[in-house]
Amino acid sequence: MVDAVGAGGILTIDLAALIENWRLVGRTVAPAATGAVVKADAYGLGAKAVARALAQAGCRHFFVAHLCEAVDLREPLPAACSLYVLNGLMPGAEAQCAQAAAVPVLNSLDQIDRWAAHAANLGRKLPAILQLDSGMSRMGLSPEELAELSASRQRLEGIELRYIASHFACADEPSNPANAAQIARFEQMSAAFPEVPWTFDNSGGALGGRSGHFDLVRPGIALYGANPLTNGPNPMRPVVQLEARIVQLRRIPAGAGVGYGLTFTAGRETRIATVSIGYADGWPCHLGNRGAAYIGGVRVPIAGRVSMDSLTLDVTDVPEAHLFPGAPVEMIGPHQTLEDVAKDAGTISYEILTRLGRRYARRHLGA
Ligand SMILES: *Cc1c(COP(=O)(O)O)cnc(C)c1O
């Protein structure tokens, strides 16, 4: 645990807002159930704290990417909560997966056969989700593999199928015709399993305005406050704030250079603030000379490259009262959203979130 006195940045995670976002998804997709995707340490926000808060609010379905993430979450979560492993079942991981009571999302015939063989070994049924590739070409059974499985249904003996799953490629663009095409293919393919419930929607699918969300939805990014849709206003409450601090201030004359490579040259007498966050904290190098921060509500552009542990801001236009060593600097907050940062960095909010550094002091609100 990093304390605020020693840290370069303070990451505030509003668990009450997280729960409100989860409930908003729940109201939107009802009567479908709403799970939570907590892979990648809950998109960088702390999987244990996030999963515990959601479980307390009533969430019973948790999705991670890797088995190791499920192993870490098994103990903090109530036994009634299911932990599903989206990346499936790696060769040799069968015993550990069963032991952790993790539910693999089976993505191939090979994974099905190994999970069924392990169930036979143990002499009991093992739960699983079966994923079908409805058009994204990333994970899940192709139509040909599904036909092969349908012709030899005994391969599923010993497996208790909890859900049939698939995943949208373009859910952030609700009007993209690829979405309807994926649903049509999924409905056609899933007809082979009329008795098994379905899970399809991620955040964008759940909040994109479609009606009918099958049986269980799997939101991730929307819970963490980012806009799940590429266009239009963000319906989610912000969950994350990131505050850095001024380390040092200096005045430089016109013509002086700033930072590695001296890529910024002062065009006038300039006030520079050095701030205690760098690329080792997940602040992208790509924001050198293009991103900004806010001090006292004033936009302050990044001057020069982002260093490993610090960056430099042109604070010439900021009132003196806001400029002192230790003064707060808003990196993500009311003036600068995750989406703003992602756009300036030429990336997506998912990447900004999941890269947020391990050496911030983390404050959880409303736990
Ligand atoms: C990551 C992931 C999700 C969550 O997606 P969001 O866009 O963050 O809501 C859902 N399903 C699968 C298969 C995923 O990989």
Image (cartoon, rainbow, N blue to C red):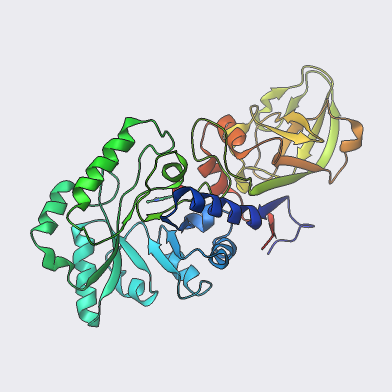
Q: Nearer the viewer, residue 29 or 291?
A: 29
Q: Nearer the viewer, residue 223 or 309?
A: 223
* Residue 265 seen anywhere in this rendered image of the structure: yes
Locate residue 41 relative to residue 300 in the image: left or right.
left
Q: Position of residue 266 (x, y in %)?
A: 77, 21
Q: Position of residue 188 (x, y in %)?
A: 19, 46
Locate residue 343 relative to residue 106 in the image: left or right.
right
Q: Quadrant of the C terminus?
A: bottom right
Q: Nearer the viewer, residue 84 or 353?
A: 84
Q: Quadrant of the N terminus?
A: bottom right
Q: Position of residue 89 (x, y in %)?
A: 30, 63
* Residue 135 seen anywhere in this rendered image of the structure: no
Q: Residue furthest bottom?
A: 123
Residue at the (38%, 48%) spot, across then down: 213
Classify residue 172 by image quadrant. Answer: top left
Q: Position of residue 284 (x, y in %)?
A: 59, 38
Compared with 334, 27 (above or below) is below
Locate residue 51 relative to residue 365 in the image: left or right.
left
Q: Residue furthest right?
A: 321
